[in-house]
Amino acid sequence: MTIEVSTVADDLVVLHDGANPHRFDGLEPDTTYELLGTEVRTLPRPPGELLSVVVTVNDVHFGEFECGVLEEFPGGPILRAADGADPYPEMMNRAAVAEMAALGPGAVVVKGDLTLDGAPDEYDAFLACYEPAFGDRLVHVRGNHDAYHGQSYAAGPQVRDMAGARLAVLDTVQPTSTYGRVSTEQLDWLDEVAAGSDRPVLVFGHHHPWAPGSRNRSDTYFGIHPDDSERLIDLVARQPRIVGYFAGHTHRNRVRRFAVTGDVPWVEVACVKDFPGSWAEYRVFEGGILQVHHRISSPEALAWSEQCRSLYSHAIDYVAYAMGGLGDRSFPIWPRPLSGSPA
């Protein structure tokens, strides 16, 4: 089995040899190490004190019982939990909650697809898993799976202030549709939230944006509608307090950067429920923020996610798609120059 570098932070590296995790703590920042025959460089540590920690998950899919069901790839394989075993979304989310809770985060953002089909019992199962662990630190917003029948729970934008950062959560859902939108009212709200902030703003939403200039400009784009994407990207370009946008929906780890917003990362984080089984940590320092990707690493979670390497294998390389490159998973996020400040 090939050694995979799944996590890199300023002081931590985690490698996986299949279902066997190898954790190296207490490392120096911005330093190259050879670990299990693999060369890895830790992230640079932003200047100043660590002010707060935020964690995030998405596409948790309570109520799902078949993994790999996708109209575009009807050939499967379709995977299910073993007879008598807990449903895999419940097992994977319990493990993610335990790992995140161990950090004592100041906020936990769950950015959509809380359920398979938005059924009340599926939403109740999500709350039963996350609320006892996190209480009022939990911030959650709906995804397309949660509103296929016009449901309105977990709807609307939200804001949460942390030491060193403001979290702005958008509701990108069009009820009854897979595709995303961001309304004019929400864009105006985000404009005000960013303009009034005295700290960096992290924006979260379920859907990812359309890339400006893409040749395929479609009303059925899988993420946020191109018109709304352009308005959102233009807003970020003129609001230097916004330092990143963080989505789910695609079940992949990916970072894009657009010319008009410079080094601002437009991020997608892979799902909890299958391979690689992901959650992300944001370490907020006085002088910058680190995104640190984590692979859920309980024995049960790794045994399941390793099975899920085979998803869509007749059509795509799901491992490469879902895992992304190391730079798609763990990276620094730097402050942007404010108006009138030296570049």
Image (cartoon, rainbow, N blue to C red):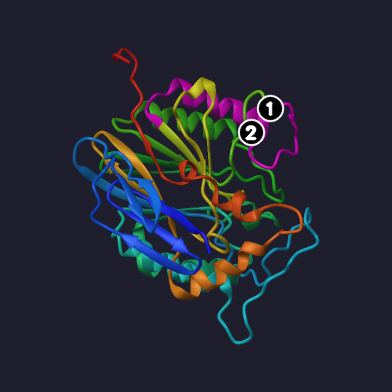
Query: Circle 2 sits in a helix, a strand or a loop, which is it?
Result: loop
Query: Circle 1 sits in a helix, a strand or a loop, which is it?
Result: loop
Image mark for residue 210:
2
Magenta region includes residue 222? yes
Relative to the observer, which residue lies in front, 97 or 180? 97
Do callouts 1 and 2 mark residues in contact (Cβ within 8 Å)?
Answer: yes
Image coords of residue 216 (percent x, y): 74, 30
Relative to the observer, which residue lies in front, 43 or 158? 43
**Which mark is nearer the camera, 1 or 2?**
1
In this view, the residue farthest toward the bottom is: 84
Image coords of residue 325 (percent x, y): 52, 45
Q: Tell me what residue is drawn at x 75 percent, y 39 percent.
A: 220
Image coords of residue 323 (percent x, y): 55, 52
Q: Tell me what residue is drawn at x 47 percent, y 33 percent.
A: 189
Three-letter amino acid code of the residue under disc 2: Trp
Relative to the observer, which residue lies in front, 70 or 127? 70
Please give the range of residues in magenta: 214-242
Image coords of residue 259 (percent x, y): 53, 21
Image mark for residue 150:
none
Q: Is residue 315 above or below residue 99?
A: above
Image mark for residue 214:
1
